[in-house]
Image (spheres, grey):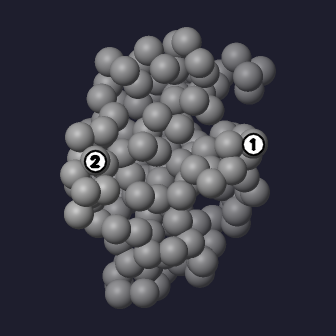
Amino acid sequence: MASSSTNRSALPDLPTFRQVLQQHGVHAALGYLNRGTTHRYTGVFRFDGQHSRNLMLFDRYDARVRQGKDVPLVEAFCSLVGSQRESLQILDALTDSRAQQVNTLVVSYCGVVIYDADGQLYGTLCHYDLDLCQQIPLNLQLLEVAAPLLYAALQPAAS
């Protein structure tokens, strides 16, 4: 019970997120966002044909991880975020009917759309885990505001 209240009081906020992003970069900013969830991973993915390409990944259990594997869209909940162009939260893929559309090992997922500078679909910002995560209130609005900031921060690295 104490850990649940600790998580709630430590929920990330936009001003601190902006500060972490500016001062410490994208990976640290993903780590900051990850504090507000019980999911193991927080990452930025870019749509590329039939794949979801990982641009940057934070792994709460291994700080050395900076990038994950690219994933075919048929194996990624990111595909649902992209096709519906709206935020998606799946607490338990084993019981959520939307999860049947995707052939993935991910059990818990929360993702938002990232648009490019021209307003075109670019990718996703998401939290995910291969295990069932404790349900805590996620601040989807923060992820939605953070997504374009992360996109802008990644552009110099993508050139």
Residue drawn at point x = 69 percent, y = 50 percent: 62
Which comes before the other along the chain, label 1 or label 2? 2
| Residue 146 sits above or below residue 123 on the image | above
Label of residue 64 in the image: 1
Crowdedness of circle 2 by 10 Å Cα count: few (<14), some, many (20+)?
few
Left or right: 48 as drawn, with respect to 4: right
Badge 1 marks a residue whose secondary structure is: loop
Quadrant of image for the N terminus: bottom left
User: Residue 75 sits in which quadrant?
Assistant: bottom right
Left or right: 1 as drawn, with respect to 15: left
Between the residue at mark 1 and the residue at mark 2, the CA separation in whole angstroms equals 25 Å
Crowdedness of circle 1 by 10 Å Cα count: few (<14), some, many (20+)?
few
Left or right: 159 as drawn, with respect to 12: right
Labels 1, 2: front one: 2
- The residue where tag 2 is placed is 6
| Residue 52 sits above or below residue 132 on the image | above
Label of residue 33 in the image: none
Residue drawn at point x = 30 percent, y = 40 percent: 11
> Mark 1 and 2 residues: CB-CB less than 8 Å, in contact?
no
Looking at the rendered structure, the kind of residue marked 1 is: Arg
Quadrant of image for the C terminus: top right
Badge 2 marks a residue whose secondary structure is: helix
Looking at the rendered structure, the kind of residue marked 2 is: Thr
Residue 16 shows up from this direction: yes
Residue drawn at point x = 33 percent, y = 34 percent: 12
| Residue 125 sits above or below residue 155 on the image | below
Q: Position of residue 63 (x, y in %)?
A: 68, 43
Residue 78 shows up from this direction: no
